[in-house]
Amino acid sequence: MQRLWRTAWLLMLTPPLFWSGNFITGRAVRDAVPPVSLAFWRWVGALAIALPFAWPHLARDLPVLRRHWVITLALATTGIAAFNTMVYTGLRTTTALNGVLLQSAIPLCILLWAVVLFGDRPRTREITGTFVSMAGVLVIAGEGSFATLAALSFNTGDLWVFGAVVAYALYTALLRRRPVVHPLSFLVASFVLGLLVLLPFYLAELAAGRHILFSTGAVAAMAYVAVFPSFLAYLAFNRGVELIGPARAGQYVHLMPIFGTLLAVVFLGEHVHLYHAAGIGLIAAGLVMAQRRRA
């Protein structure tokens, strides 16, 4: 586990895998679980899982978290409250495929936020790698055909998802300013503040008569999003940003179409085509290009 905690590339494989499943799950239960309710109970579950592990560190880290409450609140608002709620809202009217494909804009948005907020100058390799990977995403989206790609349609749900992309890119760029505390302490603080931000929206949703329609599938979906895309993925992603920086960590989001394709093959019985291989090759090439360091 210590070796895993120090190996960035291995850690960064888990968030796009779990987040790909999150899009499929959110789309599947859109009629049974309202978007804010899904986001709210997702983080309640993740908090319940993380708190026992974080408890020994919280007493030591609480004074630091209090001193840096502004940046912690900003991170919780963008990465915890806003991102997932906007994704689930968008998935009510757009497809999981569109949602996953729109996530490919996150690395580019991270580079732009880093320039605006911190005056970063992205390396040519990072910019080139980002666009090469995005080209691979477009090959998969268009099934290797420009006509198919041009025929893709976008709606209001896609705007919600793109808003989530902008929010999560901001979260990733701001992670460099997070308080220097134990990762579990930071995770629990983020979950608590994110839930406080979500609470009024959750109560408004309940007041509007939008309640969870409980079933085995709905409960299983909420359990999945609490454990894998929330607790485990955020722990790994935050650590990855700490190890290799936001720009390089953001490149791994391009793996989502690959994992989405694999999940569709395994769980939906879909078939792999030549354009999948071409798109995966471009994504991998862009990822390697962006991750290489100068001598």
Image (tube, rainbow, N blue to C red):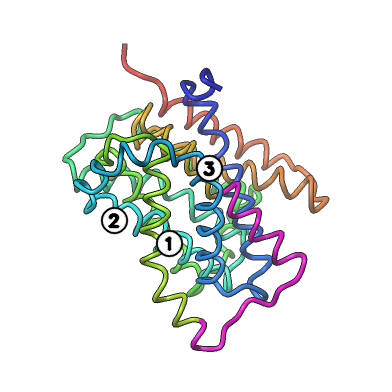
Q: Are marks 1 and 2 in contact (CB under 8 Å)?
A: no
Q: Is residue 44 left or right of residue 140?
A: left
Q: Could you tell me if residue 127 is visible in this image? A: no
Q: Position of residue 262 (x, y in %)?
A: 71, 42
Residue 143 among magenta residues: no
Q: What residue type is disc 2 on?
A: Leu
* Mark 3 crowd level (few <14, some 14–19, many ≥20, 10 Å Cα): many
Read off the magenta span. 206-229
For this orientation, the residue located farthest to the left is 119
Say if 98 sits above or below 262 in the image: below
User: What residue is drawn where x is 49% and y is 81%?
Assistant: 205
Frontmost of labels 1 and 2 is 2
CA distance for labels 2 and 3: 20 Å
**Residue carrying label 1:** 162
Q: Quadrant of residue 241?
A: top left
In the rendered structure, find residue 208 and report the number of the disc placed on it: none
Q: Quadrant of residue 284?
A: top right
